[in-house]
Image: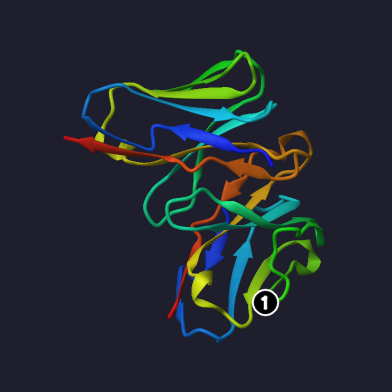
């Protein structure tokens, strides 16, 4: 089945630094979603990408749909303590009937 | 607009006991999902409903797990009997349907601990 690989697995950064993480797929995706999950909560949708090459921002977050359609990137500028959490990439399964998730990137911010 | 509501938030049971989880999706969302999330991993689909019909339950362990979505709104997920390996977070999500069906909105989840 389709698999999503996220890197890095975890990051420990200084408050104010920019963050970059990515997600690669073994097959082509038509949609890329980025979610954030806080401890004890469900994932919350941050950004949705629907077109190869698309670059979309949501506040300090920017995500890009890779032109090969097999990868996506999420950048966070000027990190703050509340950015702490697990960031998941996700995309529709083979038949578009479910979301396939990566294993997540754990972000820790040192203030 | 209210989000996806799940209850209970936490549940601790002894192995071999039954347990049930409840989900109320976002109003008007025809598609409902139950996901399983193990520690350190992303969510994995258990079952997907389109209205009251289960259209994808291939990942649901049917020997012990069951689900229903009566009237195409609320849903319950049941485990009977529970095993130690069932300890995980059970997430419910819903989608509007149509071209927006990829964007799933999640509830807070139910954290199950089987002892």
Q: Could you tell me which chain the residue with mark 1 belongs to?
A: B
Residue B24 in the image: state x and y as whole percent: 63, 62
Q: Quadrant of the C terminus of chain A?
A: top left
| Residue B83 higher or lower than A103, as above or below | below
Give the residue pinned by disc 1.
B64
Residue in the foreground of this view, choosing between B7 and B47: B47
Q: Residue at x 61, y 83 (%)?
A: B81
State whether residue B1 appears in this view: no
Residue in the foreground of this view, choosing between A67 and A109: A67
Left or right: where does residue B101 sit relative to residue A104? right
Badge 1 element: loop
Residue in the foreground of this view, choosing between B26 and A7: A7
Left or right: where does residue B86 sit relative to residue B70? left
Residue B47 in the image: state x and y as whole percent: 71, 59
Left or right: where does residue B60 sit relative to residue A54? right
Q: Residue at x 66, y 70 (%)?
A: B76
State whether residue B16 appears in this view: yes
Q: Residue at x 66, y 29 (%)?
A: A31
Q: Quadrant of the N terminus of chain A?
A: top right
Snapshot quadrant of residue B65: bottom right
Residue A88 in the image: state x and y as whole percent: 49, 39
Residue B2 in the image: state x and y as whole percent: 56, 53
Snapshot quadrant of residue A90: top right
* Residue at the limit of the structure toward the left, as seen here: A111
| Residue B14 higher or lower than A26, as above or below | below
Q: Residue at x 62, y 23 (%)?
A: A70
Graded by Cα atoms within 10 Å as few (under 14), some (14 to 19) or many (20 or more), the crowding at tag 1 reads few
Snapshot quadrant of residue B12: bottom left
Left or right: where does residue B20 sit relative to residue B47? left
């Amino acid at each position: 089945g389709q698999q999503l690989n996220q890197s890095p697995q975890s990051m420990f950064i200084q408050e104010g630094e920019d963050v970059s993480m990515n997600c690669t797929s073994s097959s082509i995706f038509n949609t890329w979603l980025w979610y954030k999950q806080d401890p004890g909560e469900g994932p919350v949708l941050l950004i949705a990408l629907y077109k190869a090459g698309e670059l979309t921002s949501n506040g300090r977050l920017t995500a890009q749909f890779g032109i090969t359609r097999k990868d996506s990137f999420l950048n966070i500028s000027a990190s703050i303590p509340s950015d702490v959490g697990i960031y998941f990439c996700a995309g529709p399964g083979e038949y578009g009937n479910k979301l396939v998730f990566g294993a997540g990137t754990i972000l820790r911010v040192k203030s | 607009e209210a989000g996806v509501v799940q209850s209970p938030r936490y549940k601790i049971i002894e192995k071999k006991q039954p347990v049930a989880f409840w989900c109320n999706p976002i109003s008007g969302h025809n598609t409902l999902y139950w996901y399983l999330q193990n520690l350190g991993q992303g969510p994995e689909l258990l079952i997907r409903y389109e209205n009251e019909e289960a259209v994808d339950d291939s990942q649901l362990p049917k020997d012990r797990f069951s689900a229903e979505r009566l009237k195409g709104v609320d849903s319950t997920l049941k485990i009977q009997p529970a095993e130690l390996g069932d300890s995980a977070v059970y997430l419910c999500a819903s989608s509007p349907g149509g071209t927006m069906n990829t964007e799933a909105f999640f509830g807070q989840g139910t954290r199950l601990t089987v002892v």
